[in-house]
């Protein structure tokens, strides 16, 4: 499956539709990075939402930077935090784009 990569700000309702999800692969990631199926309808969606095309490497860097920032914040939490809210806190996991 070939994909396109872009950044686009989710504007809420109507940003993507049920029909869009039927017409092409679509996955949102941290940093407003979207993985979009490489077909005419996917490309039209990127244009419709004013997306900015990125290479896979550029998109991966954006996502990884956001995840690493979250991991650093997690790692810096005082140990006392875990005793109070252990079940509510989960360390961000690495994301590898398809």
Image (cartoon, rainbow, N blue to C red):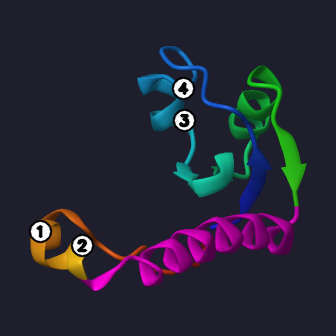
The Cα–Cα distance between marks 2 and 1, rounded to whole angstroms, is 5 Å
Q: How crowded is mark 1: few (under 14 residues within 10 Å), some or many (20 or more)?
A: few
Q: Which residue is drawn at 58% across and 22% down?
A: 15
CB within 8 Å, label 4 to label 2:
no
Task: Choose the circle earlier in sequence order: 3 or 1.
Answer: 3
Residue 18 placement (x, y as % from top left): 41, 25
The residue under label 4 is 16
User: Could you say whether the residue bearing mark 2 is in a helix, strand or loop?
Assistant: helix
Residue 90 drawn above or below residue 43: below
Decide: marks 2, 3 in contact (CB < 8 A)?
no
Check if mark 4's residue and mark 3's residue have beta carbons within 8 Å: no
Label 4 or label 2, whichever comes before in sequence order: 4
In the image, is 52 to the left or to the right of 97?
right
Give the alpha-carbon distance from disc 4 to disc 2, as whole Å. 37 Å
The reply to whether callout 2 and callout 1 are in contact (CB within 8 Å) is yes
In the rendered image, residue 77 lying in the magenta stretch gets the answer yes
Q: Which residue matches tag 2?
A: 81
Give the distance between the C-alpha atoms of the residues marked 3 and 1, in whole angstroms: 45 Å
Q: Viewer-nearest of labels 4 and 3?
A: 4
First in residue order: circle 2 vs circle 3? 3
**Quadrant of the drawing holding the C terminus:** bottom right
Of labels 2 and 3, the one closer to you: 2
Please give the label number shown on residue 84: 1
Q: Is residue 11 above or below residue 65?
A: above
Look at discs 4 and 2 and give the one toward the viewer.
2
| Main SS class of the magenta portion in the image | helix
Residue at the disc numbered 3 = 23
Q: Quadrant of the N terminus?
A: bottom right
Q: Give the range drawn in magenta.
A: 55-79
Distance between the alpha carbons at the discs numbered 2 and 3 = 44 Å
Q: What element carries label 3?
A: helix
């Amino acid at each position: 499956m070939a994909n396109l990569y872009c950044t686009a700000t989710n504007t809420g309702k109507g940003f993507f539709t049920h029909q869009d999800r039927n017409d092409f692969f679509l996955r949102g990631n941290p940093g407003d990075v979207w993985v979009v199926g490489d077909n005419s309808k996917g490309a039209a969606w990127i244009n419709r939402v004013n997306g900015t095309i990125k290479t896979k490497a550029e998109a991966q860097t954006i996502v990884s930077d956001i995840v690493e920032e979250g991991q650093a914040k997690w790692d810096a939490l005082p140990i006392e935090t875990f005793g109070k809210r252990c079940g509510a806190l989960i360390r961000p996991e690495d994301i590898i784009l398809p």
